[in-house]
Image (cartoon, coloured by chain):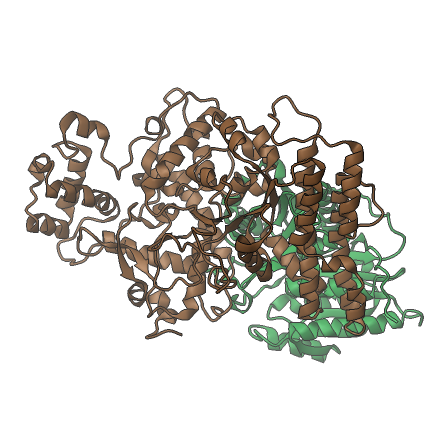
Amino acid sequence: MVDLEPAQQPIVRPWCLSTHLEEYALFAAAVGYEARANYIAAAHKPRARERVALGFVDNQVLHYSENAAWFKDNGFQVLHLHDSEFCDFWEATLSRLAAERDMGESRSLCVDISSMTRSRIAIVIDAVRRYVASPGRTVDFVYSLAAYVEPPVGHPPNTHVGPILPSFAGWWTKPDRAMSAVVGLGYEQDKALGAVEHLQPGEVWTFSPHSAVEEYSAALKKANQVLLDTVPSSHRLAYEVGQPFDCFVAFESLVDRLARESNVILLPFGPKLFALCSLLVAWLHSDVAVWRVSAGKGELPQDRRASGYVYGLRVKFGAPGAQVAVPTGVSS
Amino acid sequence: MTPQAPTIFESFNARALNPSQVARTFVPSDHYDRLAKRRHTIIVGPRGSGKTTLLKMLQQPALEAWQHRVADDYRLRIDFTGVFIPSDISWGQQIAALGEGRLDADTHALLSRALFTSHVLRALVIAVLGRIETTVKEDKIPFRRVHISSDAECLVAREIAHAWHLRDLMPTFLSLKHALSSRLSAIRELASSEAILGSQGRPERLAGISFLHLHFLQSAGLAIELFGDCIERPDEKWALMFDELELAPIWVQQELVRSFRSTDPRFLFKLALNPYDNESQILQGALSAAPDQDFDQIPLWYAEKRDSYTFCEHLWAEMLNEKSFPDYRPDECLGISSFDTPSEEWRDHGTAYRSGSRMAKRFSSLATRDRSFRDYLKLHDIDLKNLESYSGDERAAELRKIGPLIAVRDFYRKPDSEKSTTGSARSRKLPILYAGADSVFAISEGNPRWFIALVGRLLDRMDPAKRRIAPATQAKEMVLAGQKFAAMLRTIPLPPGALDSERGLLAIVKGVAEFFHSQVVLGEFRAEPPSTFIVDSNTAGALLASLGQALNAGALVYVPDDPSRLILSSVRGKRFRVTYLLAPLYGLPLRLGKEIALSTILKSTDQFRLFQVDGRS
């Protein structure tokens, strides 16, 4: 019998490295070509009953082999997967873990999103909301902030400009309403500007990241100068990468307001934590769309080392309504 | 602080405005005049060309709010009710994502049809609600209002609800609208549950859901019949106005065009389309209607820049009025374009080439620095000291023809060195060459969104005391507009089939623009260097769809050879130019020059090596 009951809404909570890296049922990381791919696993050694490292079949360059070997040597199951196989893996694994929920085992998962693509983060969120969203379950999403590297040079042509996944395409029940775009800024030259001009929203809001790695700020300002010049100052918000919960709360409350009057589309460039926040906001507001702009295989691999800063968000399932908080790290 | 003017694309995006807001700044054009006729019409134009604005201005709330001096005339002439059916890229993506890729094609098509039908019917109900509105605000002039009693509304709404399979609602038109919004949600939920339930038993499940099988035209037809009978105007016309029709399912596009010939006579169709559409090929099929006989076509672009000037002047006047400026002439504030010869010079001196004139100085400036130009002058027996003596003869015409080229060449070319045999380009961060009223008009392409954004920002930067906008300010804003447009071009994803390419849309357009620039600036001086291209048979097939995208985006401008065929299913054999919006970025002359085969351009530019083929692919 297929269960068509709607999944529970997530309750998003702060996550802290010093107190929250606990015993998990599953810890999953990405095997990527970035040096930081194994940073959290190596430096903080999260304990888990199952440990997997999920890699790619393309772009096995830079530190990829080294990372795969490290994960294997340290007791991780290492899999090199296409995106469709990645999706199958999560569906199978999470449905299996869901079936074990009464076995008295740990009910928490931890997912390191640092070296995952944005579409893979969306696949994980989608699988979590299908299979894990039941009372008592917890999923921690952790992220290793990269040390500064120069923005990528050149503009490979995009192959995808659209919903990050079909399940995050959103839904307009009033297609005649104006569109609002909420844009998380990254430091690729005019990438956010191009997406905004492509979509032609009636209203644009930007979220600029600030972090402990200060070099990003100047690069980000330069890359988005033209866009920022045309967005009213009241629509330009800043957030601290180190305080993702505050970012989430501010982001969610903005979207909640915008969605009453307009059709909302989220464009998460910049740190992957912002992409995670976007997907969680869209989970709470199913009419809202999350889009991705990508050159796919045309994007040149770029190494990113860990900065040493680790942040995260905890997603719980249980009694709803307990997530009101005052944002402290977001300002206009 | 400088007030924030609308930005080039956010600003005047009619999609984000309600009909009353659109009416506030609407400037009628010949296009609107033709669209307002009681004819089926297809309006064709790239993004930003004003398709949505024109359609929205046929809606009753827009016509009621419109205060323009000719508004009364249109209110008298328009004898149909406009039903605006919106669409946008994201909504199109949502329809495509129905069932999240886990439905078979037939089920997806069935649900998409139901979605589209609900969308059309909801738009129709919104139009009816405008007709029966009882309150009239002070600043509105009632248009096509009708009185309908509560009992009559109850009767009609109940009948419509029954026919549209809407249950358990209050029999009012407002409730019908809400119920149709709910239906849009219900269809998404249905798609989601069908994706989970799987195909077993699906035909029986879906066959039993009656609203999935409604037809949008038949259902709309029944509603207007009921409404028309109720208000005792059974023959009233209703214009179904589909915006961004290329985003609608192909079956809708094809059915609408077929309907031009054979549908309910109470319906008019007003369709907005991009100029390039290789997927539906809606005008190509045997069953298609014939342009001019069955419907009018309205192109919303101007291959010749001067054709847009009248519209630009009207828009300029409206924008001054909106910003509470006196009625300044464009050239008072923006100055005379470098590409034009001031009319005063012709009037006062009988020539614009007299000694000391701007043109004469420019000719001399280039001649001192450009060996090739000197050779040209010598060959054509042109004496720079006696330019004014050429008035009225063929060589005067020649001077006028080469004037714009000389402006660009003089601005962008470094002086020849002793040893070099070819010219070299001079970098220009601020292309003040493009300042001036006619240049601003040309660069806006008569595209309302571009014009309003660019001129809006310029007017915000005007010194009211001097009533002048400095050339440097104009150049800066033009570059900014070009950069934004370039960023948008860079974002547009490559079409299927071009996936092996290393270059995106912007690189293609930029490559062509740089070729034209080099022809004007660097090569031997020629009176007629190419500035348009024809997509010849040696152009690789993989490039054609990208060129079509560039056309729809407004980066390329179609120079039609057959005015009856404005929608292209293929760009092959057609002639184009690069949009003047990019001219200040790439140093292009603002004129429609000779054509050249695209394959010739591609062969001469390294970056197109991927597209160099000997034949079609």
Q: Number of labelled discs?
A: 0
Q: Position of residue B4 (x, y in %)?
A: 52, 33
Res. B421 visible in picture? yes
Looking at the image, is B168 positioned above or below residue A143? above
Which residue corresponds to the image point at 40% horizontal and 74% vertical from the top-left?
B617
Q: Image check: B587 left or right of B20?
A: left
Q: Position of residue A155 (x, y in %)?
A: 47, 60
Q: Quadrant of residue B262?
A: bottom right
- Which residue is at the front of the view, A231 or B561? B561
Looking at the image, is B11 positioned above or below residue A87? above
Q: Position of residue B144 (x, y in %)?
A: 62, 32
Res. A270 visible in picture? no
Q: Image check: A97 left or right of B535?
A: right
Which residue corresponds to the image point at 35% horizontal and 73% vertical from the top-left?
B613
Which residue corresponds to the image point at 23% horizontal and 30% vertical from the top-left?
B343
For chain B, what colour was chosen? brown
Which residue corresponds to the image point at 59% horizontal and 61% vertical from the top-left?
B251
Looking at the image, is B362 positioned above or below residue B323? below
Q: Which chain is green?
A: A
- Which residue is at the front of the view, B500 or A212? B500
Looking at the image, is A279 positioned above or below residue B338? below
Q: Image check: B430 left or right of B68?
A: left
Q: Quadrant of residue B138?
A: top right
Q: Position of residue B47 (x, y in %)?
A: 49, 49
